[in-house]
Image (cartoon, rainbow, N blue to C red):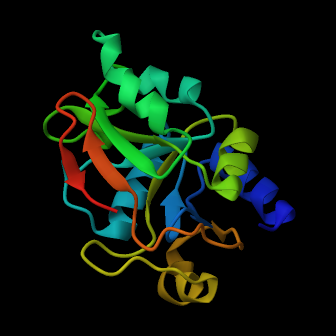
């Protein structure tokens, strides 16, 4: 991934920008999860229904812990065994998680990404970031830099150029409490 783009993207996230960047299977759209204006922009760009929540990715689990309710710490066993990797887990949401990121059932989806560029972006940004596929809700995720610019460039602040991971489909999503797979990869 272009190191200059990653550094610029990380700086922009800190200022409230909404950017696109490569992930395991497709380009993602992201921002600072505690910047409510940026989160609202992401939801608007996606045309995402209220209450669906958004995924958070990070370079390490410590960046995700403030957003997860871990009264039962044993629910971390399977996620920790799968991370870093292309596995998104649904957890009960912490009271510190902004409402705009929660699902209607008060949960949050999180992943410690194995994609080197996305990990580096989170590391340089110094935080977990929102990560949702770069497409309008219900449309096919975008897998090409040029297509991101063509389809969403007018509403994004920046696009990080770089290769996608080797995943053919978006990451698997599993409920950390029930261990039920909600979306297969």
Residue that appears at 38% across and 53% down? 40
Q: Position of residue 81 (x, y in %)?
A: 47, 32
As drawn, which residue projects farthest toward the left? Answer: 105
The answer to whether one can see residue 95 in this image is yes
- How many marks the image carries: the answer is 0
Residue that appears at 47% across and 52% down? 86
Which of these two is toward me, 131 or 80? Answer: 80
Which of these two is toward me, 145 or 11? Answer: 145
Q: Position of residue 107 (x, y in %)?
A: 24, 34
Above or below, comparing residue 82 to residue 165 in the picture: above
Residue that appears at 50% across and 71% down? 26
State the image quarter where residue 78 is shown: top left
As drawn, which residue projects farthest toward the right? Answer: 4
Q: Position of residue 91 (x, y in %)?
A: 29, 30
Q: Position of residue 165 (x, y in %)?
A: 59, 66
In the figure, is residue 23 to the left or right of 159? left
State the image quarter where residue 95 is shown: top left
Give the position of the N terminus as an image quadrant. Answer: bottom right
Residue that appears at 79% across and 65% down? 5
The answer to whether one can see residue 70 in this image is no
In the figure, is residue 61 to the left or right of 141? right
């Amino acid at each position: 991934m272009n190191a200059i783009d990653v550094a610029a993207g990380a700086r922009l996230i800190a200022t409230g920008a909404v950017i696109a960047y490569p992930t395991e299977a497709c380009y993602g759209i992201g921002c600072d999860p505690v910047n409510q204006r940026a989160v609202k922009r992401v939801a608007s760009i996606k045309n995402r229904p209220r209450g669906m929540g958004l995924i958070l990715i990070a370079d390490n689990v410590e960046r995700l812990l403030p957003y997860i309710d871990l009264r039962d710490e044993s629910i971390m066993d399977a996620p920790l065994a799968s991370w870093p990797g292309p596995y998104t887990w649904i957890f009960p949401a912490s009271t510190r998680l902004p409402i705009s990121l929660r699902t209607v059932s008060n949960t949050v989806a999180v992943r410690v990404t194995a994609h080197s560029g996305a990990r580096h972006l989170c590391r340089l940004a110094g935080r977990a970031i929102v990560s949702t596929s770069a497409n309008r809700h219900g449309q096919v995720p975008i897998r090409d830099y040029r297509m991101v610019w063509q389809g969403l460039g007018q509403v994004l602040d920046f696009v990080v150029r770089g290769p996608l991971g080797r995943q053919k489909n978006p990451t698997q999503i599993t409920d950390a409490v029930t261990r039920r797979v909600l979306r297969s990869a």
